[in-house]
């Protein structure tokens, strides 16, 4: 557990007396604090445009330069649908419609020396106006790909690889 969080001291009292507790937590023997490092919720959109799928090139770490689906982490007090619409709008300026759940995929996300385990909920959706596409600073480029023939080594995360592979077989 400490290897995932990189915690060497208790987040509450700063004492170094922390130990692994259960499989996803640390316990401070000095103050009794327990920190659970639970799975984070994330969303992604498979947006079909002109018979192909929209992918974004990541402009920042992790996986800078690789391709990803539009999406991201779910904020506090936000539903999956709300997070999806917000993330797609933030990254592409596209409004989406006809949102349908496609599946969930486990993922590992390494950021700033912390390993996050995510459950990525992937949705099929349409863009209201694909011509309105405008990239945010989070992405350096975009492309439209055929998931049946694309090179999966160009994809940033295992969850994206698995979801596009399943989508290509459907």
Image (cartoon, grey):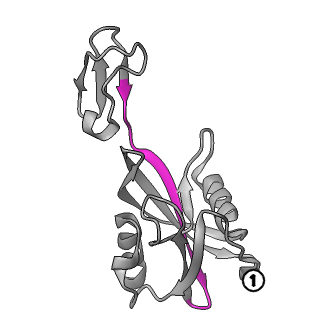
Asked if the stretch drawn in magenta spans residue 168, the answer is no
Residue 1: in sight, yes or no? no
Q: Position of residue 61 (x, y in %)?
A: 46, 59
**Residue 92 sits in quarter:** bottom right
Residue 8: in sight, yes or no? yes
Q: In front: 168, or 9? A: 9
Q: Above or below — where is 121 with respect to 68?
A: above
Task: Classify the position of the C terminus by image quarter.
Answer: bottom left
Q: Above or below — where is 130 with respect to 7?
A: below
Task: Classify the position of the N terminus by image quarter.
Answer: top left
Q: In front: 57, or 144? A: 57
Q: Above or below — where is 141 with respect to 19?
A: below
Q: Dot 1, how many residues are within 10 Å of its Cα: few (below 14), some (14-19), or many (20+)?
A: few
Q: Is residue 59 shown left or right of residue 8?
A: right
Q: Position of residue 65 (x, y in %)?
A: 47, 71
Rendered residue at 70%/63% (across/down)? 89
Q: In front: 170, or 18? A: 18
Residue highlighted by disc 1:
131
Q: In front: 79, or 5? A: 5
Count of numbered tags: 1
Q: Please, what is the dominant secondary structure of the magenta stretch?
A: strand
**Residue 88 sits in quarter:** bottom right
Q: Position of residue 39 (x, y in %)?
A: 39, 43
Which stretch did the figure color magenta? 35-51
Rendered residue at 26%/15% (across/down)? 17
**Residue 86 sits in quarter:** bottom right
Q: Is residue 107 shown left or right of residue 144?
A: left
């Amino acid at each position: 557990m400490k290897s995932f969080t990189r915690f060497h001291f208790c987040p509450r009292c700063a004492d170094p007396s922390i130990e692994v507790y259960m499989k996803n937590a640390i316990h401070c023997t000095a103050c009794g604090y327990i920190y659970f490092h639970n799975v984070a919720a994330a969303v992604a959109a498979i947006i079909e445009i002109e018979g192909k799928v929209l992918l974004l090139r990541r402009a920042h770490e992790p996986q800078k330069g690789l391709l990803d689906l539009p999406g991201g982490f779910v904020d506090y007090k936000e539903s999956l649908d709300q997070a999806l619409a917000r993330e797609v709008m933030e990254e592409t300026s596209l409004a989406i419609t006809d949102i349908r759940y496609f599946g969930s995929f486990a993922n590992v996300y390494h950021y700033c020396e912390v390993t996050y385990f995510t459950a990525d909920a992937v949705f099929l959706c349409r863009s209201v106006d694909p011509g309105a596409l405008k990239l945010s600073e989070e992405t350096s480029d975009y492309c439209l790909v055929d998931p049946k023939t694309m090179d999966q080594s160009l994809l940033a995360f295992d969850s994206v690889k698995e979801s596009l592979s399943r989508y290509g077989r459907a």
